[in-house]
Image (cartoon, helix red, strand yellow):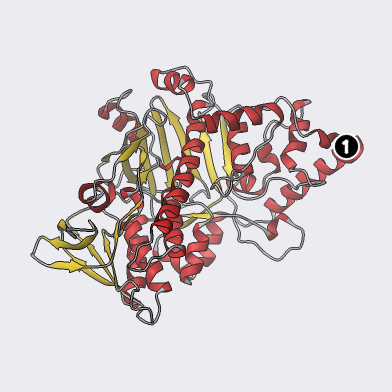
Amino acid sequence: MNNNNIRKVVIVGGGTAGWMAAAALSKVMKNRFCDIELVESESIGTVGVGEATIPQIQVFNRMLGLNEDEFLRKTCGTFKLGIQFVDWGRKGDSYIHAFGEVGRDMEGIPFYHYWLKEHLRGGSQDIGEYTLTALAALRGRFMRSVDAGNSPLSNIAYAFHFDAGLYAQFLREYAEQRGVVRSEGVVTKAQLHPDSGFIESIHLDDGRIIEGDLFIDCSGFRGLLIGETLGVGYEDWRHWLPCDSAWAVPCEGDGNPIPYTRSTAQAAGWQWRIPLQHRIGNGHVFSSRFMDDADARTILLRNLDGAPLSDPKLLRFTTGKRDKFWHRNCVALGLASGFMEPLESTSIHLVQSAIARLLSLFPNRNFDRVDIDEYNRLTHFEMDRIRDFLILHYCATERDDSEFWNYCRTMEIPDTLAQKIEQFRANGRIVRANSELFNELSWMEVMLGQGVIPRGYHPLVDAMPEEMFVGRMREIKSVIERSVEAMPSHKAFIASHCA
């Protein structure tokens, strides 16, 4: 064994990020490769409102070897086929950013170009008519994929809604069973090596000192290690994403959870609705520059589907990212690394992808600079591209009914986003850069939903004879319609598998 290997990993902070890291490390580090200790305090609360996910979380759960039904039972989870956006492009508008396939690609050309041809000559007004998950979501239907040959039912993309606190508890049990040590305590300071500046240990409020080789900062917005101790700066994105506050509150559900997240635009932000088995998670994300706290709270409570189960909780945040995510022997995860408002349910995914990146570039005690630089480069790229996708929702709008929307509609946007919009406007083309999170279909669904309609479509679409074009479009729509009708209700599926 290489005696220069990491001997101990110390995770500062629990919550979703901390226990995801602990669970993943405990799974991978078999045969007592190194010690793992997580330090958290019950006296310090977690944000705990990230309850919606994207399909990639299935990769994380499979890596841990979790049973999906057990996971959903223990977290009061439901299934998610996409996100419905209400009043974003214009008041009265609604569209779904649905997961998975759209239509069926033909002759090597993405299906949505054929749909654009149909749309531009006065046909279909909603590409969701050709999207299994969009139709199923609105009709309250769900099932997992089955072996049905060429049917859309063979490839159903989905994610989850779950109680973030219960998820952290579930992962804690998993990690502790695999040797992770949890220590209760408040971290008061970190001790640095006088020469290297690396973190040597953390000090707790009861006098205990915990030493380690690799430190993972999951301390939330505070960034106790990455920010307060190591002095890594923060890039503020509020000039593009002006929301900086949120009220959050759970309310009673009706016992029939819908299989999608809902995001409803408000006068100075937006409201989320996340249906769980035992309740509904709600929040109002808003800009304090354009709306005061009291008005934002009133809007939230006025738009609940059931009685609130607690007093609303006010959160403050600064959308942006750290200048570095890995510095010296410290890696920041979750809110300590940056914050993206949960408009596209990326918060938990960013923890997941950071853990995967860390495992791929896992160091020894040399902490080679080339690996740290690559980790930071990849993380910057991922966050910048997600940032652009979120900005798209705000800038591509016709709303002019408030100062907030006037600001968003007319603000300068990053060149990378402006280029993507213009290329789509021209002929519906979307180029996915490297391995950015959101693929061509996600960009297409949101741009169309927000009212960005291309002037044309891929020229080779016209190579298909007219009669064949009409027949294939009709058949694809019919197959999807029949497939949705064959699916059970979301409520019934949950009752049968994971209630």
> Looking at the image, is 180 positioned above or below residue 82?
below
- Residue 146: horizontal and vertical position, in percent? 67, 64
Can see residue 130? yes
- Residue 53: horizontal and vertical position, in percent? 47, 52
> Looking at the image, is 82 positioned above or below residue 209?
above
- Residue 49: horizontal and vertical position, in percent? 35, 48
- Does residue 2 appear to the left or right of 208 in the view shown? right
- Residue at the left extreme? 207
> Looking at the image, is 428 positioned above or below residue 407?
below
Q: Residues within 10 Å of mark 1 (few under 14, many from 20)?
A: few
Identify which residue is drawn at 33% across, 74% down. Answer: 4
Can see residue 68? no
Q: Nearer the viewer, residue 179 or 145?
A: 179
Disc 1 is placed on an element classified as: helix
Identify which residue is drawn at 36% across, 35% down. Answer: 285
Q: Which residue is mark 1?
A: 463
Q: How many marks?
A: 1
Identify which residue is drawn at 47% across, 19% down. Answer: 410
- Does residue 13 appear to the left or right of 130 in the view shown? left
Which three-letter amino acid code belongs to the residue tagged 1? Answer: Ala
- Does residue 483 appear to the left or right of 307 in the view shown? right
- Residue at the front extreme? 195
- Residue 3: horizontal and vertical position, in percent? 33, 78
Q: Quadrant of residue 432?
A: top right
The quarter of the image holding the N terminus is bottom left
Identify which residue is drawn at 75% across, 48% down. Answer: 104
